[in-house]
Amino acid sequence: MAASRLCQRTFSAFKPSNRLWAPVSSRCAPNQVTRQLALTSRFSLITQNFDAFSSRPVARANLLLGGILEESKRPDIIFLQEVTSDVRTSILGNPKVREAFLVTDAEDQTSFEGVPFANMTLLSSKRFAFDLEMQKEDGVERGEKFMLGPVSRVKLPSKYGRCALSVDIIPPSTPTTTCRLVNVHLDSLGDTLFYRTEQMEILANLLREPGCGGGLIAGDFNAISPEDHALLDKNGLVDAWVALHGNQGFDGATWGVGVERHDGLGPGRLDKVAMSGVDAKDMEILRPGLSEVPKPGEDSDYIPCSDHYGLRLSFTV
């Protein structure tokens, strides 16, 4: 089957719907809403793998999310991977999330059933709205926010049942053209390169569908080999880190940093942002802090909040 047909079939199997998007709490009263800045096309994104299998996943996720939600550095877009069902519940109960973000999978946990973890996407309610009428009701001038289009879980060929979480954002000035944001966690380990190759072809085609003006794919690419790092260029995508820092610049490792491993795998740039039709402005690696693991009758141990470093990207549409 041709890759383009596979992409179309897989994508349409998950009917695009706004059902997955929900504000976690009811909208604020108009007198609680301050007028937003005029619409700009510059956005900030943080992508972070929560590391589902280390101890105390909820405590670690809370610490990671707390850092992401710091007021002075709070991003417009948050991509999260390896979110367990318990961590999802914790995210939905977070007061800062409830106040300031629209969240996928807030209505039910269907996407978390039968899998060890799933992805979640959070979008700032300061920058995004369901439609122009919602902006008017919130006391915000019409046309100041990007509107939300369809959101879908795109089933991928996968050994581990992985999906991509895709959402369209629509500039109110050009409502016939969308920008697509795709949150991914590709297949893990060396024996699944075949799957990652297929996955990247499908994902790249998502950014080229009719009416889509491009966008970005971000998250855990599990890029552990030179063949993995060649997949973006092969599919006509721009590697944001390479675009900003060059192949000879900072190595950009996001996994295995400062850890001695027995499997021979050293530090790697497993987490990435791939772009088409958008421009990267600046990008940095976010080192996770430490989480306390109490030990009865002994001093506590401290472990990294995640085995993945996060990425922060500023980009323009």
Image: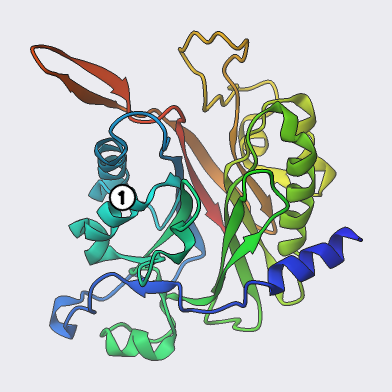
Q: Is residue 178 left or right of residue 75?
A: right
Residue 151's x, y, as percent? 54, 71
Vertical placement of residue 139 versus 2, above or below: below
Q: Is residue 137 left or right of residue 46?
A: left
Please tell me how crowded label 1 is: few (under 14), some (14-19), or many (20+) other residues with Cα within 10 Å.
few
Residue 146's x, y, as percent? 47, 74
* Quadrant the C terminus occupies: bottom right
Q: Quadrant of residue 134?
A: bottom left
Image color mode: rainbow
- In the picture of the structure, the residue carrying the numbered disc 1 is 86
Q: Quadrant of residue 182?
A: bottom right
Three-letter residue code for mark 1 = Asp
Q: Residue at x 65, y 40 (%)?
A: 187
Helix, strand or loop under label 1 = helix
Q: Residue at x 49, y 8 (%)?
A: 260
Which residue of the protein is positioned furthest toward the left in this rendering?
297
Q: Is residue 144 left or right of residue 192?
A: left
Q: Residue at x 32, y 44 (%)?
A: 68
Residue 143's x, y, as percent? 44, 83
> Between 93 and 179, which is closer to the camera in this rendering?
93
Residue 65 seen from this side:
yes
Query: How many circles with numbers are drawn on the protein?
Result: 1
Residue 184's x, y, as percent? 58, 50
Residue 38 seen from this side:
no
